[in-house]
């Protein structure tokens, strides 16, 4: 009779006890992963081992435990990556909006400056044409209006420069955000890069 192939009652009991212990440990691993997800905490081998009261070796050696931890880590990484991309998209949208607003204000300032220059040209032409026929107080009034318009043009030119600087800054910020977004996309494409 060959006793090596038929386990004895003590061996069978030991194997059954080991199987129950492994199943209990697996159940604790699944519960630990579920708790970490509910708490929105970082899922890692160390955190699962600590919460499930199992060794890291168990998590690496047991195929089911290893697969469960790997799946949870992947899912957690994807959720975190989505959150980072959403935050970057929100920031980029604000910078785009600012850049568009600055461009719109710049166009409006250019249009207003052009209309004021046209008006100044018309007034100067009227002054030259009618300078001899008009009384002195009319000439002074037109000269005063001309001076006022010139001051307004200078003010609009200054405002135009300020808006142009803001537009350049907004474009620079947008380029920075584009580079950051590209970096995040690269990180998402290569999850093993330490995210």
Image (tube, rainbow, N blue to C red):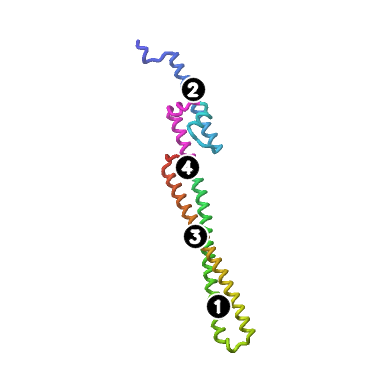
Give the mark nearer the N terminus: 3 vs 1: 1
Q: Position of residue 60 (x, y in %)?
A: 43, 29
Q: Regarding mark 3 in the picture, which secondary structure is present there?
A: helix
Spatial CA span between label 3 and label 1: 30 Å
Task: Return the mark for residue 172.
Answer: none
On the rendered image, what quadrant is the N terminus found in? top left
Query: Which of label 4 and label 1 is nearer to you?
Result: 1
Spatial CA span between label 1 and label 2: 94 Å
Q: Which residues are magenta?
A: 54-80
Task: Return the mark for residue 120.
Answer: 1
| Residue bearing the label numbered 4 | 78
Residue under the point 48% across and 32% down: 45
Q: Position of residue 188 (x, y in %)?
A: 44, 44
Query: Which of label 1 and label 2 is nearer to you?
Result: 1
Neighbor class of circle 2 (other Cα within 10 Å; few <14, some 14-19, many 20+) is few
Q: Position of residue 163 (x, y in %)?
A: 53, 63
Task: Return the mark for residue 168.
Answer: 3
* Cβ–Cβ under 8 Å for marks 1 and 2: no
Q: Residue furthest bottom?
A: 133
């Amino acid at each position: 009779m060959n006793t090596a192939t038929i386990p004895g009652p003590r061996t069978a009991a030991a194997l059954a006890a080991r199987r129950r212990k492994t199943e209990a440990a697996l159940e604790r691993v699944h519960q630990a992963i579920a708790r970490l997800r509910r708490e929105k905490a970082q899922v890692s081998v160390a955190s699962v081992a600590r919460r499930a009261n199992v060794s890291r070796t168990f998590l690496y050696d047991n195929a089911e435990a290893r697969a469960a931890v790997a799946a949870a880590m992947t899912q957690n990484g994807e959720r975190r990556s989505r959150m980072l991309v959403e935050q970057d998209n929100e920031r980029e949208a604000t910078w785009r909006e600012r850049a568009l607003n600055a461009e719109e204000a710049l166009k409006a300032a250019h249009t207003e400056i052009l209309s004021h220059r046209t008006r100044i040209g018309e007034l100067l032409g009227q002054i030259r044409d009618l300078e001899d026929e008009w009384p002195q107080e009319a000439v002074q009034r037109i000269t005063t209006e001309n001076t006022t318009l010139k001051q307004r043009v200078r003010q609009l030119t200054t405002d135009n420069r300020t808006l142009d600087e803001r537009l350049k800054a907004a474009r620079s910020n947008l380029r920075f955000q584009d580079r950051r977004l590209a970096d995040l996309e690269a990180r998402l494409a290569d999850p093993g890069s330490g995210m």
